[in-house]
Image (cartoon, rainbow, N blue to C red):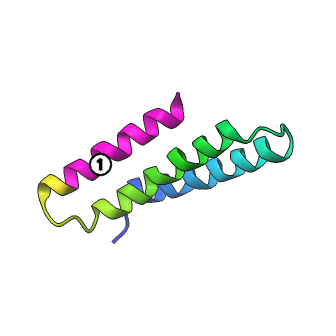
Amino acid sequence: MDSILRDKSYIFAISIVKLAQFLQKEQKEFVISNQILKSGTSTGALIREAEFAQSQADYINKFYISLKEANETNY
């Protein structure tokens, strides 16, 4: 099953990995780049996890946490 949200979160994660690599290699910045990497890639992982949720409440919770991680990355 195709999922626009899953596809977009995957593309977002790739962009985040490239950004983190740039920050670490070119700017020699490690603390913020590691946090961006964690929050940016967990967004897609949580969306994927939600697809296999055990209940509707679990499904909603996974998406809510994913939204929080996306907001953290945006900050």
Residue most toward the right? 26
**Residue that badge 1 annotates:** 63
Q: Please give the name of the residue rendered at 62% of the width and 47% of the height, measured from the top-left corner.
A: 16
Count of numbered badges drawn on the protein: 1
- Which secondary structure lies at badge 1? helix
Q: Is residue 51 left or right of residue 71?
A: left
Nearest the camera: 5 or 58? Answer: 58
Residue 50, x across and y down, in percent = 29, 60
Classify 59 as above or below 24: below
Check if residue 71 falls in the magenta segment: yes
Q: Please give the name of the residue rendered at 73% of the width and 42% of the height, measured from the top-left corner.
A: 30
- Looking at the magenta stretch, what is its main secondary structure? helix
Residue 15, x across and y down, in percent = 64, 49
Region rendered in magenta: 59-75
Residue most toward the left? 56
Residue 6 lies in what quarter of the image? Answer: bottom left
Q: Please give the name of the residue rendered at 64% of the width and 45% of the height, measured from the top-left corner.
A: 34
Amino acid type for the residue under numbered disc 1: Phe
Residue 61, x across and y down, in percent = 23, 49
Residue most toward the bottom? 1
Residue 55 lies in what quarter of the image? Answer: bottom left
Q: Is residue 59 left or right of residue 20?
A: left
Check if residue 61 falls in the magenta segment: yes
Classify 35 as above or below 21: above
Categorize mark 1 by other alpha carbons within 10 Å: few (<14), some (14-19), many (20+): some
Residue 59, x across and y down, in percent = 21, 56
Q: Is residue 11 left or right of residue 24?
A: left
Residue most toward the top? 75
Q: Please give the name of the residue rendered at 37% of the width and 56% of the height, measured from the top-left corner.
A: 46
